[in-house]
Every structure is written in C-alpha cells, then in structure tokens.
Image: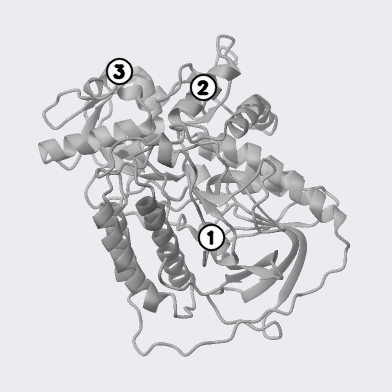
Amino acid sequence: MTTSVPRYLVAFHPKQIPHHFVDVLILGGGIAGLRATMGVDPSLSALVVTKDRLNESNSVYAQGGIAGVIAPEDQFENHIADTLTSGAELCDSEIVEMVIREAPKHIQQLVEWGTAFDREKGKLTLGREGGHSHHRIVHALGDATGKEIMRAMIERAREELEAQIWENTFTIDLLTHEGECHGALVWNQYHGKTFIWAKQTILCTGGAGQIYRETTNPLVATGDGHAIAYRAGAKLLDMEFMQFHPTVLYIAGSSRTLITEAVRGEGALLLNAAGERFMPSYDERAELAPRDIVSRAIVDQMRKTSHPCVYLDLSPLGPELALKRFPGIARSCGEFGIDITRDRIPVRPGAHYMIGGVEVDQRGATTLPRLWASGEVTSSGLHGANRLASNSLLEGLVYGAHAGEAASAAAIEQPDTYQATPLSNPAIEAHGEPLDLVDIRNSLKSLMWRAAGVRREGEELARAGETIDQWCRYALTCQLTDPAGWELQNMLTVSRVVIEAALRREESRGVHFRIDFPERDNASWQERLGITCGA
C-alpha cells in the first residue's frame, strides 16, 4: 500500500473523554461474539459492543445452516475431505479436523440453548449443499437458520448470562501501548467517544461485503474489524479471497437478497437467458459444484448471452416442497411479483463471505498480544481458498468458544489493577473542502466489483490500486466525525489490502480467479499471503 495509514482515525486526549474498565471486551454481537461471551468466566466482567442492534449481523441473515456430521451414514473423514477439496489445497488440515470434530457438540449445545432446528419425526432434518458429499446441514425455519440461532443466543446472553451489551456503538480503533492491545476507543450518540480499557479484547466484527457493489451482506459489514486490526499492527492473511455467492436475487434497483445454496441442494436448476441448463458443461457436480465454480460459470454465461443474470428454476422441487422448505425466499421474491413455484428467479453472484482476515491460532490468539478474534473477521485456515457451504456459522461457534475461554483464562491471570494507559492523538487541520462520502463510497464499491470481483486481471487490479491510493491520500488524512466517515475510511483501507493481495497472487485458486494466470500453481503459490500495516 503506497499511502500511509494513520494509526488512529480521530483525535483524542485521556483527560477529555470518559473511561470504562472491563475484564474482557467483545467487539461484535454476531454468532462469534455471543459465543465468545458465553465462554467468559462468570467471575469476570464482560462487555459486548456492537455497532448496530444485536439482531443486525451477517449471522442473522445466514440462510442455509450449520454443517456437522450427524447422520449415521456420514463420517468426520467425509466432512474433512469435502472441506479440504473445496479449499483448493490451501486449508490448514489440523484446523479443519479440529473444527469439524467439534461440530456435533456445538450443534447439540445450540439445541440445549433453545434453538428450534427443523425436524422430521423427531430427528434433525439434514440438508445438502454444494461441495458436500452427504446430507449434513442442520437448518431452522426452512431458510432462516441464522435468525433462529441468533434469537436463542441473544435471549441466553441477555437473560441467563446478564451480559453487559452496548448496542449502536461504533468501534473506532483498538487501543495499543508498547505492542499490546489494551481495549478500544468507541463512539455512540449518547456519550460521544469513550475509552474502554480491557485486560483482554476479542474481535468478532464480521465481514466486509459492503466494499463491493453486489453483495448479500447487510449495511453494517464494512470491514471495520479488519481495518482496526490492520492499523493496530495485527497480521492479516488471505485477503485476496472474497467468496462470491453464485445466487443472489437480481432485481434492478433493489437490495440484493441471498438465495441459499440449499435451493440447489434440493434440486433447483440453473438456466441461462435462453432457458438452457448450463452447469453440467462446467462441472460433473453440476448445480452442486463448489461456489467458486458456479459463480464463474454464471459470469461466463452472462458474458456469452449479454444478459445481466441467469435464472433459478425451482419447478423440479414441486410447489409443496418449495414453499415449505424456503418460505423466506418465497416472501422475498413475492415482493417483486415472483412466484417461486412457477416463475424463474433472476440471480447473479454477489460478495458473500470474507475468507481473509486477522491471523489466529487454534485458540483464537492474533499476532497482537491481548487481542483475540473469531468469526468472519479472522483467517483461521479452515476455509483455504474457498469456503465450503455452511462451515461459517460452525467456525464462529468453535472459534468463539475457544477465544472466549482463552481470553477469559488470560484475564483471570492478570491482577485487578485497572489503569488507563497514557494515550493521546492530536487533532490535525481539516481540509478546506468537505468530502462527498456517498460519492466516494459508491465509486469504491463499483471499482472493487469491476477489478476484484469474480474475474480479475493484473493490469486492472494495478489501476484500481492507484485509484484507491488517490482516494486514500485525502480521505485517510481527514479526522472525520461520525460512523459514515469512519466506515468509508475502513472500506478504503480494506479494499486496498484486498487489491494488493489479489495483485500479488499470480495464479488462480479457489475464489481468486486471474484471467491472466488461469491455472493453479502449487510450485509457486501454495502458501498463504500475509499483510501487515507498514510492512
């Protein structure tokens, strides 16, 4: 990155803003953050900070479910093999085995906490999605798994654990001193800026899909955790790997709604503008091929037909199964006059899951002492170069548990002497002209979609990097005053790192497809790329 990144986004002085002290600070209220909170020892004080409401996160919008070996005919070795195959020879095999072997107990724990998974004759209903060799996807409310899981977890966090939760509070930056994390600087409209000093901090801020014009992610997914960790000096890994979900409802002018992969798992077919089924000509697994293959096939068909989308045909399911299994999708499509029992659903790929993130070990420890992380903000090695469907909620649960327990154990070892660290950041002179934040944001999202989307090319990536550098030179040197500005600065920072990583990896692997380097190159690139601020 050729543009210097400021260590802190805003000016502050410890004598001018309030201070709050806590044993364990959890940044983010999705599945990873709440699971981490549940792992904190009851003798410690814990605080969850989330920039929106607790029920506004990628976790809530997850449709498909959680993968786990539950069926008698399935085995851990099958799930492990499917994950490794999908990850395109870049997974950490030890991490894969650890997470998958822990899956059943975490699913059972959700049941004990009140999650109402779908059942048939008293047994959990198991679905199948792309890349899976067996039916092993546990789901709820048909196609609203994340919503049901988060309902149960939020209820437990509030009522049973009596967790301290600050909603609608934006985390501006991590606080660091002498190479260690000491908490975070946050802001809300009631108290303004506040120092939260913590013995241990757990980062669970979710994804970064909003850096792209086409995305399934809610508006909150602006890569804030990636950016604050990067500015604090933590190492990021695999930032070239953004997973694009192949089937996102495409209605011009509307928000993009995910059409879960489970639709294809139940038998739906992909058709091009001419009404022709095309996936068998790209992969023997057809509609159940991994997401990277299906996304590239759809983009290829869109280019060949000069049409803005392809179509999902649910008629093979029959009306009764389609409505019973996918009530949420039926409602979403119905808002646009689409009857999923007889009409084809227009779909195209969209940014869905950020595989890259903060490097963590098996416990969730980052490279920055006293900072832990779990969930989509991390790169654990589970997903490799392409995430297997329904492994993400699972990762949030497993790593949330590990990070919560490890941070808790570390906090217990620290003495109960609460002390603010003497940190300050001086104000800088404001630019003469105000920035049009909306214009820069929209331009960035469009640029990222063109240059670092499903198909990538070196010269275009380089030009995009130069453009983002130009925006960074004036947008990152401003000390902006509200979340809209801080989000834009975070999006610029994360986008530039994604461009840098995508430009460096001169091969095609998993979700990273370079048309100028279309083949996988294990001899040169079977390694994970790390990026650290200033390195």
Kind of residue indicated by mark 2: Ala
| Relative horizontal placement of residue 130, taking residue 302 as reference (left or right) | right
Kind of residue indicated by mark 3: Glu
> In the image, residue 281 lies at what x, y percent?
21, 21
Which is closer to the viewer, label 3 or label 1?
Answer: 1
Mark 3 sits on what residue? 284
Q: Residue at x 37, y 39 (%)?
A: 511
> In the image, residue 295 lies at what x, y percent?
30, 36
Circle 3 sits in a helix, a strand or a loop, which is it?
A: loop
Please state which of residues 348 and 415 is positioned toward the viewer in this rendering. 415
Tag 1: Cα neighbours inside 10 Å, few (<14), some, or many (≥20)? some
How far is mark 1 from mark 2, CA to CA? 32 Å
Query: How many discs mark residues in the rendered view?
Result: 3
How far is mark 2 from mark 3, CA to CA? 18 Å
* Numbered tag placed on residue 532 in the rendering: 1
> In the image, residue 219 lies at what x, y percent?
42, 56
Circle 1 sits in a helix, a strand or a loop, which is it?
A: loop
Looking at the rendering, which quadrant does residue 153 occupy?
A: top right
Mark 2 sits on what residue? 81
Please state which of residues 125 and 458 is positioned toward the viewer in this rendering. 458
Looking at the rendering, which quadrant does residue 229 occupy?
A: bottom right
Tag 3: Cα neighbours inside 10 Å, few (<14), some, or many (≥20)? few
Kind of residue indicated by mark 1: Thr
Contact, CB < 8 Å: mark 3 with mark 1?
A: no
